[in-house]
Image (cartoon, rainbow, N blue to C red):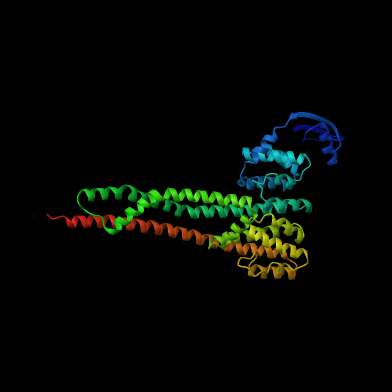
Amino acid sequence: MLKFRYKIAGSSKEGTLFAHSKKQALALLTRQGIQASILTLLGRDDSQDQSKCVKKLKSSVALPFLKRLLQLHSAGLPLGDTLKILQTRLKDPKLRTLAVVIWRDLSEGKSLGSSLRNYPNVFGDEIVCPIEAAEATGNLTPVLTEIIRLLTEREQLKKKIIAGMSYPVIVSVVAIFVVAFFLFFLLPRIENMLTAMGGTLTLPARILIGFSNMLLYGLPVMLVLMVCSTFLVQQWRRRSESGVLKIDTLLLKIPVIGGILHYIEICRVSNLLATLLDSGVNLTEAMRLTERAIRNAYLRKQYQEGRLKINDGVALTVAFNKNKNVAMFPELALDILMVGESTGNLQNSFKEIYHLHNQELDVRLGRLTMGITSAALGFAFFMVTILALGIVSSIMQFSSSIKF
């Protein structure tokens, strides 16, 4: 890829673009309606290597990058100028590289949405689809604001989950170390001491010895089997569409976890539909774009069936009203959508669905965290109690058998 500088004919304005040759550079300028009086080759561009670096980035860089993009673009700067400024203003090398490659794509005549789609590891469909629709309708700033709000809420939810899980994880780790110390170090020494002195272990202590031996020899086998099973399931899921559908269906049926996964999909779909409808996209196109963002294959299949019915003229609430164990939209959401259809204000209905299910999602995650915390504390208390009883009872039995 070569880098060129051009000067607009009849003006003092200059710009840069990237192309494989001078002929392609002139064609790109013509396509953008720019007549250049001077076209100078600046040298070879290294942004191809930077594109490879961007493809290794994670989705966590999307939020800070979009925030900086919105700050300058909402002030009235065109996207090209905004990205050009970000290349020098951004201090984080990851964000700076991201600005370089996107600016290069824009200089080649691509839209922002098509450029972001080249980096799915950073920008998912829930980001790209609204931006593509916003560029088509000219409502990029409000859509970017809504996307940033959604990503911010998601980051806050992740932090809340991590903060809530940190305590039970620490308790579980400490409990495992304490139990392992008693089972594999202290208890065998006490057994050897009692055996040498002619004493015997009580039933609880013998059960603990058997349990420790089972863990010592059986745990590695169990870990190997779990790793192999996980690998085989992942391979089946990757190579078979039926495997993806069956596994995703099974995930939705898992108690507690299935409900959380379902509510995450509802929040993602309803928020994306509300954003697209607000940006001026019609319902049919909005639903087509939203389908890409659904990650669960079972729910995506249901959604696709409903979307095709809507294309045939069926009402939205009728299309998604299915008597199944796990429906894409529950009854409460369908009731809200019925009101939105009757009033012609579906975007507000989808917003209401998002807020209601997002609140319920927070409640369910809180319950899950509390349950894991209680289970970890209960397991630690139970194991330490059994160990203490086994050791103390054995020592007391031996001491009572000693005759002075």
- Label count reads 0
Q: In the figure, 393 relative to 48: above or below?
A: below
Q: In which quarter of the image is the N terminus?
A: top right
Q: Residue 8: horizontal and vertical position, in percent?
A: 84, 35
In-image side of 42 versus 60 (left or right): right
| One can see residue 75 in this view | no
Q: In which quarter of the image is the C terminus?
A: bottom left
In-image side of 75 versus 172 (left or right): right
Res. 281 image quadrant = bottom right
Could you tell me which residue is drawn at 50 percent across and 53 percent down? Answer: 163
In-image side of 211 versus 128 (left or right): left
Q: Residue 168: horizontal and vertical position, in percent?
A: 45, 55
| One can see residue 238 in this view | yes
Asked whether 250 or 181 is in front, the reply is 250
Could you tell me which residue is drawn at 21 percent across and 48 percent down? Answer: 196
Could you tell me which residue is drawn at 43 percent across and 57 percent down? Answer: 376
Could you tell me which residue is drawn at 58 percent across and 61 percent down? Answer: 252
Outermost residue toward the left? 404
Asked whether 243 or 18 is in front, the reply is 243
Q: Residue 342: horizontal and vertical position, in percent?
A: 74, 71
Q: In the figure, 207 relative to 122: above or below?
A: below
Asked whether 113 or 231 is in front, the reply is 231
Q: Residue 84: horizontal and vertical position, in percent?
A: 72, 38
Res. 248 image quadrant = bottom right
In-image side of 207 versus 222 (left or right): left
Res. 90 image quadrant = top right
